[in-house]
């Protein structure tokens, strides 16, 4: 499995539809300062569910929409699609190709899609968990991240190994199961209370 293309429209400096193709190997993106290299990695993180405007170097989410230029009106929406080659079925999805899309309009509407079909962010997060390509995974090492890894506490650093070892998915499912158990227990207590009142 590998990332084949990133299609960007209306996201940050990418006013026009731009498709970036990657090979199954090593790709380097070079360009002058301010030409949009970091915007590409941010576009990828954004599709994978980044919710923090600050992490995308903005103050609010609408800052990711192309803000206009002297000769260009601002965009009405931002949309990014990542297409993965999944011939080896490394992603738990029965198709040779998988595309993930996120769209955000100036009105504040947000939409996610898997292979052009609307889905929840959670569907994308679960699909990418433990693949090494998640929003918080270590396939995207931003500036300052290396230093952060070396200086963080041992238990925080453990997260890196957990992601690499593929246990994050199970941790997340355990957390969800515990949440449901607690909820059910609360409901049970309520039922016992009602029962004791009417008994
Ligand atoms: P460096 O090499 O200095 O790190 P870079 O190639 O990574 O630069 P980016 O940081 O990706 O460049 O791009 C910054 C550019 O993106 C700036 O020119 C900035 O004005 C532009 N930009 C950011 N947000 C928007 C937006 N919402 N609308 C239009 N342009 C934007």
Image (cartoon, helix red, strand yellow):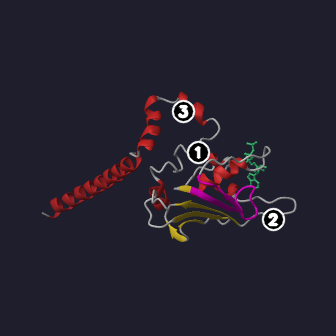
Task: Pick whichever of labels 3 and 2 is earlier in the sequence.
Answer: 2
Q: Alpha-carbon neighbours of circle 1 within 10 Å: few (<14), some, or many (≥20)?
A: some
Residue 113 drawn above or below residue 193: below
Task: Pick whichever of labels 2 and 1 is earlier in the sequence.
Answer: 2
- As drawn, the label of residue 73 is 2
Q: What stretch is highlighted in magenta?
A: 3-24
Q: Quadrant of residue 159?
A: top left
Pointer 3 residue: 149
Q: Quadrant of residue 110?
A: bottom right
Residue located at (81% from left, 65% from top): 73
Spatial CA distance of label 3 from label 2 is: 41 Å
Q: Alpha-carbon neighbours of circle 3 within 10 Å: few (<14), some, or many (≥20)?
A: few
Question: Camera-side residue: 97 or 16?
Answer: 97
Pair 3/2: label in front: 3
Q: In which quarter of the image is residue 116?
A: bottom right
Residue located at (87% from left, 59% from top): 70
Left or right: 30 as drawn, with respect to 98: right
Residue 147 image point, x, y percent = 59, 31
- As drawn, the label of residue 140 is 1
- Residue 16, magenta (yes or no): yes
Farthest left residue?
199
Residue 45 image point, x, y percent = 59, 52
Q: Is mark 1 on a helix, strand or loop?
A: loop
Ligand 1 closer than 8 Å to the CB at disc 2? no
């Amino acid at each position: 499995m590998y990332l084949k293309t990133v299609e960007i429209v209306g996201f940050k400096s990418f006013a026009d539809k731009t498709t970036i193709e990657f090979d199954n190997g090593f790709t380097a993106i070079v360009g002058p300062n301010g030409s949009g290299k970091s915007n590409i990695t941010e576009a990828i993180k954004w599709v994978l569910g980044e919710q923090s405007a600050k992490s995308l170097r903005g103050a609010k989410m609408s800052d990711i929409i192309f803000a206009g230029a002297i000769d260009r009106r601002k965009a009405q929406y931002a949309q990014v699609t990542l297409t993965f080659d999944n011939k080896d079925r490394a992603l738990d999805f029965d198709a040779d190709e998988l595309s993930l899309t996120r769209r955000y309009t100036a009105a504040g509407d947000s939409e996610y899609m898997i292979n052009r079909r609307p889905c929840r962010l959670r569907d994308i997060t679960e699909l990418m968990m433990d693949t090494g390509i998640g929003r918080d995974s270590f396939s995207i090492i931003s500036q300052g991240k290396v230093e952060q890894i070396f200086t963080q506490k041992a238990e925080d650093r453990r997260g890196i190994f957990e992601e690499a070892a593929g246990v994050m998915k199970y941790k997340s499912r355990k957390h969800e199961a515990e949440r449901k158990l607690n909820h059910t227990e609360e409901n049970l207590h309520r039922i016992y209370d009602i029962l004791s009142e009417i008994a």
